[in-house]
Amino acid sequence: MTTPLRGVIPPLLTPLTADRELDHASLEKLVNRLVDAGVDGIFALGSSSEVAFFDDARRLEVLRTVLELVAGRVPVIAGAIDMQTDRVLQHIRAMEGLDIAGVVATAPFYAITGPEEIDSHFRILAASTDLPLWAYDLPVCVHTKLAPAMLVRLGQDGVLAGVKDSSGDDVSFRLLASLNRRAGSPLSLLTGHEVVVDGSYLAGADGSVPGLGNVDPAAYVRMHAAAMASDWEVVGREQDRLAELFEIVYQPVGKVGPAAGVGAFKTALRELGVFDTNMMSRPMSPLEGEAIGGIREILVRTGLL
């Protein structure tokens, strides 16, 4: 990438058939919907894609299909998510011949690591590829919060191109943005905190990576344009409506994590006619019953259906 990645970069969902195979037709409809809405990029193989449930072959199948469907219309960054450095490197090597704009990696997980190991992890990854490297701050899954000072230092040293912050820690994000500015803004900062993107813009975010952006990409695009124009009244109005739309994730009962959140996004897209099914990766099951009615009611109330 010759310029920093900014704007709205939704983490792409992965539609599946009733037999849990990749649904190419639904994926094409989703990709075109996002691009037509004016998104600035696409994040493939992130948490919202269900990447943690995919084997290596499925990961490459999804990424190659996404790149074919995007056809160079917007940049695509791809998640190289795995437990430890060597496994992440394997994913990166498999991606290097593809037309991606960067790779996204978390801190190591499962085996406990500290600040020294995490710093070394990102430096090893960056030294092993010419692709821009993005840090994915996801403590709910990784169980480690990436330190703002470390991230900025890695940006200054040319290790990281940016940060995808899904920590939900607005205090830490504000500190990260402040430290980044003082250092000359070596990092592009993208928030994944869907219902407080407005606050992230005020803190200094360069854009967002909202899972809810699969359901309503146009609203996030409008909010980004308003933020860049310092039209905070419009920013607030768009965010309030998106916060109401986000209530779809609270409709499932007895489900947590991606089974609830990604499951709600997939169900909404099925109700909108974008996906043929709301099937989830094993061992998760798709939403059914009363949750469907609750999601439909919210889609109607927020003007999408």
Image (cartoon, rainbow, N blue to C red):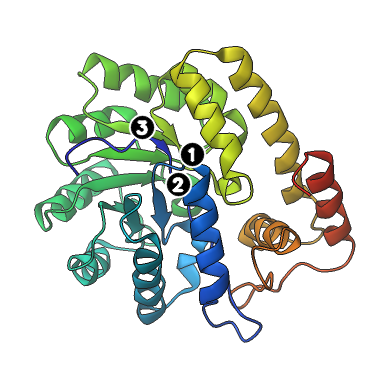
Instruction: Look at label 3 and name its amino acid.
Output: Leu
Question: Within 10 angstroms of label 2, few (less than 14), some, or many (20 or more) residues?
Answer: many
Indicate which disc, 3 or 2, sits on the residue closer to the N terminus: 2
Q: Is mark 3 on a helix, strand or loop?
A: strand
Residue 91 position in % (x across, y down): 27, 68
Depth check: give the residue in front, 224 or 150: 224
Where residue 189 is drawn, which disc sits there? 3
Residue 12 position in % (x across, y down): 49, 57
Residue at 12% x, 34% y is 157
Foreground label between 3 and 2 = 3
Indicate which disc, 1 or 3, sits on the residue closer to the N terminus: 1
Q: Are marks 2 and 1 in contact (CB under 8 Å)?
A: yes
Depth check: give the residue in front, 216 or 266: 216
Instruction: Look at label 1 and name its amino acid.
Output: Ser
Instruction: Look at label 2 and name its amino acid.
Output: Leu
Foreground label between 1 and 3 = 3
Residue at which label 2 appears: 138
Residue at which label 1 appears: 167
Examine the image and state in which quarter residue 19 appears. bottom right
Residue at 72% x, 50% y is 249
Question: Within 10 angstroms of label 3, few (less than 14), some, or many (20 or more) residues?
Answer: many
Residue at 34% x, 16% y is 178
Q: How far apart are marks 2 and 1 (CA)?
A: 5 Å
Q: What element carries label 1?
A: loop
Q: How far apart are marks 3 and 2 (CA)?
A: 14 Å
Examine the image and state in which quarter residue 199 appears. top right
For residue 235, above or below residue 110? above
Residue at 66% x, 63% y is 259
Question: Within 10 angstroms of label 1, few (less than 14), some, or many (20 or more) residues?
Answer: many
